[in-house]
Image: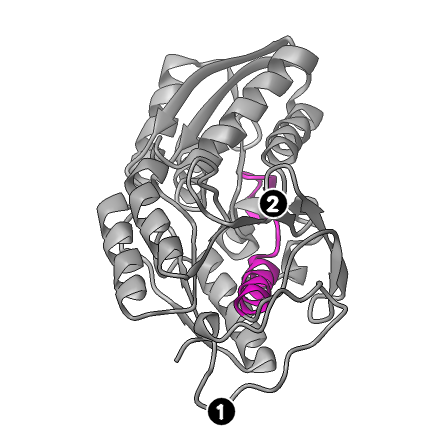
Amino acid sequence: MSHRNTLLGAVALGFASLPALAQDDTTRIAFIPQIAGIPYYVAMEEGGQRAAEELGVEYVQEGPTSTNAADQLRIFESFVNQDFDVIAISPLDEETLKPAISRAIEQGIVVLTSDADAPGSDRQFFVAQALDRDLGYTLLDEAVARIGESGKIAIVSDSPSIQSMQNWIAAIQERAESTYPEIEIVSVDHTDGTAQRAYQFATDAMTRNPDLKALLGMASTTCPGIAQAVEAAGATGEVLSAGYCSPNTARDYIKSGAMPYSVLWNPADLGYLTVWVGDHLANGGEITGSFEVEGLERTIEYLPEDQVILLGQPAVFTEENVDDFDF
């Protein structure tokens, strides 16, 4: 018997507790990343498992082996069929998932998005690492601080169906238009989720634009490719590469100078928060305002207009601090 079938009514966040549950009635929480095995999602899993151990819940993480929306949908439906209490997902393609999310919620399953959102779906909350606007602004602001307020920039992203990355690109474009009018975004390319394809697009962008000043990567899968392209072209110190990738993924390139910085957040904390929120909701809790999470030792902000639960501000990893992190 699952928790969602034994709810005892809504509990105001942080101000009430539920009776002890039977030992065989453990909350079951699943998370589906965009791709399995990369350091970023490994760190999310570590954080999720830590929360699960502390909260006494079961946590399972499974994702596709490539950024394939159909495979992600099959995994989602498998967790629905296994009667999980909570399913969290970092969507690859909102339209593919929308009907399945609606059916899961009709069955009483708590459905969250985490890491990336599907705002047009029926998902109940988005557990967000940082606001898309802040992520886009930070990546461009840090680039401009290094290359100056004029010049050409190329963007290399993952699949165009990943809405969060499209939002980051839109924020970068808006920031350039409103604040840095002499910054020219010369191209936006979309890969198949591999570093090899990112390498090709980055190389092509530098060939087409000999005066290119920066390459910005929108995913951990693209960051190594664009940094390798800069190194292979002998352009370290001439063409800046940067993006959204984990310290472990970016470390060698940060130290070589090919990628002077990376923007991200702590995915282990995001995994922890996702499991905490899922367990809280599965046990009848409500999210009505900002709240404290003891395991994270921080206040979590709630944005009710979009049902967004916000972990915090973006982090910038540089040569000075990259060795302080391991994910």
How far apart are the alpha carbons under marks 2 and 1? 32 Å
Q: Nearer the viewer, residue 233 or 225?
A: 225
Look at mark 2 in the image and give the residue it sits on: 308
Q: Quadrant of the N terminus?
A: bottom left
Q: Amino acid at mark 2?
A: Val
Residue at the image point whose x is 31% and y is 63% from the top: 80
Look at mark 1 in the image and give the residue it sits on: 23
Q: Quadrant of the C terminus?
A: bottom right
Left or right of 65 on screen, residue 45: right
Res 235 visible: no
Whether 256 is among the magenta residues is yes
| Callout 2 secondary element | strand
Q: Does the magenta stretch mainly form a helix, a strand or a loop? A: helix
Residue 283 % position (x, y) = 56, 71
The image quarter containing residue 91 is top left
Residue 250 % position (x, y) = 52, 49
Q: Look at the image and give the residue range highlighted in magenta.
A: 255-282
